[in-house]
Image (cartoon, rainbow, N blue to C red):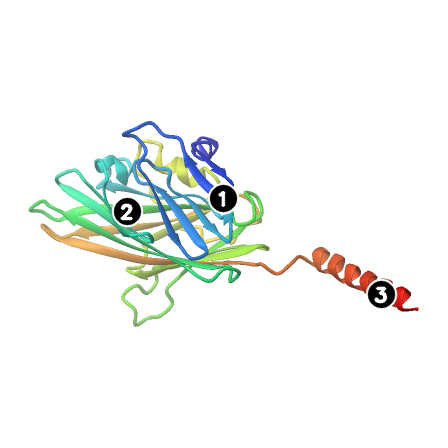
Amino acid sequence: MKKLIVCKYLVLGGALAVFSVPGQAQIVVLNHNNSSASIDTGSSAGMFNWTVEGQNVLAQQWFWYRVGLTAEAPINALGAPVITTPDARTLYASYDNGSYGVRVDYRLTGFSAGSGNSDITEVITIFNHTAVPLDFHFFQYSDFDLGGPAGDQVALSVNSNPLSPSFGRYNTATQLDPLAGVTETVITPGANHGEVANWFTTLAKLENGVADTFNDFNGPTAPGDVTWGFEWDLTIPAGGSLGISKNKALHLNLVPEPTTLALTALGAVGLVLRRKSRSA
């Protein structure tokens, strides 16, 4: 599954070349300063590329849902996306089946070249068009490959402020690699469940055709190809809506590795010695 998603796209000379069947993949590329993000709004590939300083750190991040005890399905199963891009860094994508719908608003914030920093904010709104409350379960699945597919650690944490409406709920995911770190913060409301697992374990739950609940394993895990997810168990009022807001912050470690520093230092010493021998 993961290899199939990756093989749909090809990066040539820093530009994204998209090969897709018309009407199936609807890909939007956001750009701002040192960053770009690519979202396949028409399939569960979802956001499959977040490139900062020329380095892609993301394999897949997308959303699933279920109503009651039905099986989970990706939000693009609700219907063809209605896409609005008011500027180069912003995307609004809406999905609706007539009874209920989901809208995802993305905003990419890149920083100056060489900073190694980038942010993505997401506001998700779930709509209930029916005359009765809706038992709605919303899932986010995340597969980041910060320094490659096998060297990351992940830990989830819960809100520890007893005065917060989200007290005791999941509000942060942190993934670290020697080369990079990403933190996703749930601003409101906190997620009811979370899950950290080796690649494909969580994705298999979302695609197995039965209702599942994330297992609340917070990590951290041993370094590997690790994924994580959040689950919100919501009651959407009749004729109403509820929102989820989040922010992803990425930092790349652009400091040269110790071996690189050592080689640079040796080169500098050699240059000084050559200059001294010439002056002698």
First-in-chain label (3 vs 1): 1
Disc 1 versus disc 2: nearer the observer: 1
Classify 10 Å Cα crowding around label 2: few (below 14), some (14-19), many (20 and above). Answer: many
Of helix, strand and loop, which one carries label 3? helix
Question: Which residue is under mark 1?
Answer: 14
How far separated are the C-alphas under marks 3 and 2? 66 Å
Residue 169's label in the rendered image is: none
How far separated are the C-alphas under marks 3 and 1? 40 Å
Q: Residue furthest right?
A: 280
Residue 18 in picture, x, y percent from top left: 40, 34
Disc 3 versus disc 1: nearer the observer: 3
Classify 10 Å Cα crowding around label 1: few (below 14), some (14-19), many (20 and above). Answer: few
- Quarter of the figure with residue 79: top left
Q: Is residue 253 left or right of residue 124?
A: right
- Mark 1 and mark 2 in contact? Answer it, CB < 8 Å: no
Residue 275's label in the rendered image is: 3
Please tell me which residue lies in front, 215 or 50: 50
Q: Quadrant of the N terminus?
A: top left
